[in-house]
Amino acid sequence: MAVCCDLEADINGEETFLLDKKIICSFSGRLSKLFGKSTGANRNKVIFNDFPGGAENFELISRFCYNKGEIDINPSNISLLYSAAEFMEMSKSVSGNCNLLEKTKKCIEELGYWTWPDLLVALKHCQEMQQVATSSGILEKCLDSIVGRLAITGEASPCASTSSPDSSGLRLSCDTRSTESLKNSFSRANWWFEDLSVLSPNLVEMLVKSMVSRKYNQVIISRFLLYYQKSKFFTASSDEKRQVLEIVIDGLYTLDPSCISCKSLFGVLRVVLNLNISKSSRNKLECMIGSQMDQATLDNLLIPSPYGTSCLYDVNLVLRFLKAFLREGGWRLSPTRMKKVASLMDLYIAEVAPDPFLRFSKFLALVVALPDSARDCWDELYHAIDVYLEGCQKKKN
């Protein structure tokens, strides 16, 4: 049987295919409408500049047509095949029987029954072709299945601890368990961290939103975000690090404040200081830290001043923390929390008071930042004021 090559297809300028027009048009509504019932001896040519998946994917659908509508649809190609089927209008109304569009749709409907490795493969390919995968809806379905699988397979249903989440972070139940049991519980809860740490920042953002909407354990989400940040930093460029940090901070900001420790937030801050992240993300991080100022330590607050400034420590940053504490705390600002922050600030003021470059306006702002009711004793603060005034007197002399 002679092979007919009466259709030339230029795919995105990558490669040109010689095809049997009759065979291809019997599956593609787009080409069928374009050429109608043309049977002329002359070869026709079609140029596609935006074919999804490029020449490699066009070859796949060509094989589907030549193989009488049979093809292996798997997690690595389903996203591209579906998009190509839509692009080429490969529906049942054209072929008269189950076409590529119906077959890929059926596979997508069964996505919830895929194995975990298959879901990861599909997600990886969705990441490589995110625009195509997003428009087709496969990416959203894949992420939903991932989150649903995590919710189903999550062992022990850990809940947030009422103490600092930095200590154990998880609680198996209300009864007393050994430290070893807690460690094993966390190990079971974070088994998926490494698998999903390969995702791009954009996909992690989508993943976190899906997890929050599905009410997944927010302590585990926060731990994953911190794990993701550290794992990505090993090989990332400065721009990539900035993008990762912004996604991590934005993700943490959507969680309940009790789900991440103050210590962990200061760990993120130390990294942020060396990168020029967006003002919005920086403000969110400062708000999160400020809302937990009563859990901070003096060492946490002794942050060097930005390059180019003469002061020893970044007093402006601490003032912003205090402002956030007073604003974000709201009704939760119990007298106990206020007094803890006041004691911390007395230690901080005493530490920065000897700095000869600390302007009076900044020192005064630190002194009056908290209401009088926050302190039972003023001795430490008075002493720091004396130290600062003595330093001012020495500068004059």
Image (cartoon, rainbow, N blue to C red):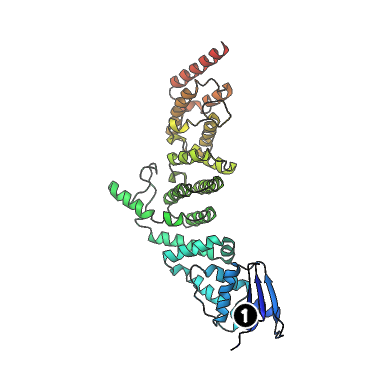
Is 88 placed above or below 146 here?
Answer: below
Is 114 placed above or below 364 here?
Answer: below
Regarding residue 174, the answer to whether it shows in the image is no
Instruction: Give the class, few, some or many, for how many residues have Cα within 10 Å of label 1's Cα (few <14, many ≥20).
Output: many
Regarding residue 112, the answer to whether it shows in the image is yes
Is 20 placed above or below 372 here?
Answer: below
Q: Which residue, as the protein is rendered here, is positioned at the far bottom?
A: 1
Q: Quadrant of the C terminus?
A: top right
Q: Quadrant of the N terminus?
A: bottom right
- Going by the image, does 44 lie left or right of 71? right
- Residue 136: percent from left, percent from top: 57, 66
Image mark count:
1
Task: Return the residue nearer the eye: 299 or 179.
Answer: 299
Q: Report the amino acid beneath label 1.
A: Ile
- Going by the image, does 34 lie left or right of 85? right
- Residue 95: percent from left, percent from top: 60, 82
Task: Return the residue nearer the eye: 151 or 188.
Answer: 188
Is 240 placed above or below 31 here?
Answer: above
Residue holding disc 1: 24
Task: Return the residue nearer the eye: 72 or 369.
Answer: 72
Task: Return the residue nearer the eye: 126 or 385.
Answer: 126
Q: Residue visible at 66% across and 79% down?
A: 7
Q: Which residue, as the protein is rendered here, is positioned at the far front?
A: 2
- Residue 171: percent from left, percent from top: 35, 49
User: Image quarter for residue 96?
Assistant: bottom right
Q: Residue visible at 54% across and 42% down?
A: 284
Q: Residue visible at 44% across and 34% down?
A: 294
- Residue 239: percent from left, percent from top: 56, 46
Q: Which residue, as the protein is rendered here, is positioned at the far top?
A: 397
